[in-house]
Amino acid sequence: MKFSLSVATVAMAISVANAQVGMWGQCGGNGYNGPTNCVSGATCQKLNDWYYQCLPGQAPQPTTTQAPPEPTTSVVIPPTTTSTGTTPTTTVAPPAGAPSAGPNGLHAKMVAKGRYYFGTAVDQNTLSQSVISNIVKEEFGMLTPENSMKWESTQPSRGQWRLDGGDYLVNYAQQNGKHVRGHTLLWHSQLPGWVSQINDAATLTQVLENHVTTLVTRWKGKIQHWDVANEVFEDNGQYRNSVFYRLLGERSIEIAFRAAAKADPNCKLYLNDYNLDYTSSKLTNFIALVNRLKAAGVPIHGVGTQSHLMVGNGAIPTFKNPLQMLHDTGLDVAITELDIRMKMPSDNSKVQQQSRDFQTVVKACLDLPRCVGITVWGVSDKDSWVPSTFQGEGDALLWNNNYQKKEAYTAVANALA
Ligand code: G3I
């Protein structure tokens, strides 16, 4: 009996030792006890402390000149390109040497006011159009990936990474001297089913830490701000009933911030939300959370207010009040997704009101010293998320469907003059 048990144990050990991990499978990392040998054609490579993955090709060999075989699919962690940018050490001064944007654009005007940036949301689908790229190069100094760094885009299946969309934006930013606001690491939306279906806290903790660490490490030094957590509150001010809150509670936010800070200690880490444009229990609870995180020593540096607004909304004239309340947290404040939509069709009165509303928002930011930047959520009305989400509404941005500057653009430029 004793003999046969020993044989079984040895046989099992041999079989684990001989077991091979398939392409894309996990082959190492903290707490991992499985096989570590990759199938032929793959090499076990460290993505971070918690996750090693079998990736196509050989590990880089310094003594050989032979290039590793090209991956046959985009579901890989491709090598990052060499950085030519610098990481800012402050949230206000732009990195030395970065051309940023044209001398007459919105970004240059914002910097002349002592702020960090004026930005927009783009991705490969928009940036690859020369008409948009030309506007971006001239006008904007900070780029937010509209969709490409979200969870469903970056890790659609567990351990399978699609970082080409984020790489495109980051490479564009590097080549054109732009800053980047990473968006977003912990969010209930655009979250793949495999994450929502996790039902134990330990697994979710590991998955969340791994996701945050992998993304922040990937673009370390090239992303100046990250929206670490997005929209954790419902409109009634209660915590959103996401898988993160159900299994981990408020600790999920702390886990994400700590992992992000560990991966890139120089990046400014933000808590971001919408409907913070007027006093409400949501705003109160958002600020209370920020203060709890600060008191607990969680590395949080900024608060983002998305500011998806509607032309003529009664809260806009007092926009400065909630912004002041966010500012009173002592953290940096950013307006992260500004657009001001209107009921279509447009008319002169709505256009004039929209110009006044944009000016109100921009001036509110300029009135507060730690309001570091403003991002408009897209370049032209043609590419805005608004018409497909709010039926019968649109015209929310600064360039029209033909990529011409609108009155609202002039209003913003004048407010920054
Ligand atoms: O990628 C798929 C494509 O494969 C498919 O063919 C197509 C068909 O509809 O859909 C594509 O996905 C779309 C995705 O954008 C990428 O273009 C989704 O349908 C669409 O719903 C998604 O919308 C984005 C939305 O977030 C999702 O919640 C908007 O572009 C984006 O502007 C918007 O941004 C959010 C911020 O991240 C957070 N704050 C609110 C803001 C506005 O909703």
Image (cartoon, helix red, strand yellow):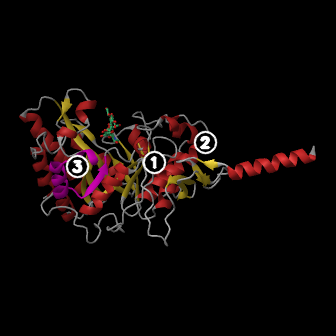
**Amino acid type of the residue tagged 3 in the rendering:** Ser
Q: Quadrant of residue 28?
A: bottom right
Residue 392: x, y in percent? 20, 27
**Residue stretch rendered in magenta on the structure:** 122-145
- The residue that disc 3 covers is 128
The Cα–Cα distance between marks 1 and 3, rounded to whole angstroms, is 22 Å
Q: Residue at x 24, y 26 (%)?
A: 391
Q: Is residue 115 visible?
A: no
Q: Residue at x 23, y 39 (%)?
A: 384
Within-10-Å neighbours for mark 2: few <14, some 14–19, many 20+: some
Closer to the camera in the image, 298 or 363: 298
Query: Comparing marks 1 and 2, which lies closer to the viewer?
Result: 1
- The residue that disc 1 covers is 161
- The residue that disc 2 covers is 201
Q: Residue at x 60, y 55 (%)?
A: 29
Q: Earlier in the sequence, mark 1 or mark 3?
A: 3
Q: Do the residues under discs 2 and 3 have CB atoms within 8 angstroms?
A: no
**Amino acid type of the residue tagged 1 in the rendering:** Trp
Q: Secondary structure at mark 3?
A: loop
User: CB at mark 1 closer than 8 A to ligand 1?
Assistant: no
